[in-house]
Amino acid sequence: MNPGQSEISDNLTPVAGVTTLLLGVLAIIAGVLLATYVLPLWLPGFASSITGESPKVYWYLSRGSAIVAFILLWASMAMGLIITNKLARLWPGGPVAFELHQSTSLLGLGLALFHATILIGDDYIHLALWRVFTPFASQSYLPFWVGLGQIGVYLWGLLVGSFYVRKRIGTRTWRWIHFSSFMMFALVMAHGIVSGTDTKSLWASLMYWLAGGSLLFLLYYRILVTVGMGRAKQKATKQATSAKPATVTGSSGSPVAQTGD
């Protein structure tokens, strides 16, 4: 999520936000039902983890939702940068890119909350509800790195909520809030890399490298576009100023245009 989408975000309405939120909740419920009732038919090990002496279904659901939430966060950040550096004009179009930017962020936030709260049922971590929502309160598993993820989720919620109060807080404040999206992504990514149990897997390493690298590329491209536009504007201003004829005061006191021979 990034500043620079003010023209498109003016069309955002509370009704559209509520509709997107409801669709996100339904998607989460559908995912939980799929993982609970369909996957055990294909994965016997998953079924035994539910009915065994030490059920791990909560841990599996937490891991899976965390990965999907991170991918959705990356997609939202990428769409935000694509909008601000004008690449959205090429694909997929400004309004579509903004809708994807908002929807993926909202759905990703829902999955991130699911990722955290589902661990309450895990027998290994033993997280109480208040520890889930209190940064650095997780004493049983990497409290510092888990705390970074918790702060990242709070920032994520602030960014998502700013979409619906933009007209009240003003465009400038809204943009400054959205600048924190880069910090938020860094916190979430650090949390995933250090505390994630799949980090050593090749696919997970590639996911983090591709996500971080692609966003750095889009950010660098955006900076180049901003600098280029600023220089072009300065050049146009200088040319417009130099094109104006100079004036001198005549004997009668009235200005007379001074032109070249």
Image: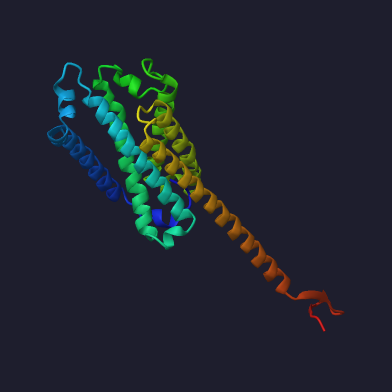
Residue 195 place in picture, x, y as percent: 39, 26
Above/below status of 112 relative to 53: below
Residue 52 place in picture, x, y as percent: 16, 19
Does residue 228 appear in this view?
yes
Picture quarter containing residue 50?
top left
Residue at image x 18%, y 39%? 30
Toward the bottom, the furthest residue is 261
Residue at image x 15%, y 27%? 47
Residue 31 place in picture, x, y as percent: 21, 38
Left or right, 87 with respect to 30, comes to right
The one of 22 and 53 positioned closer to us in this rendering: 53
Picture quarter containing residue 256?
bottom right
Residue 94 place in picture, x, y as percent: 40, 59
Q: Quadrant of the C terminus?
A: bottom right
Does residue 158 appear in this view?
no
Residue at image x 14%, y 36%? 38
Picture quarter containing residue 34?
top left
Above/below status of 40 relative to 104: above
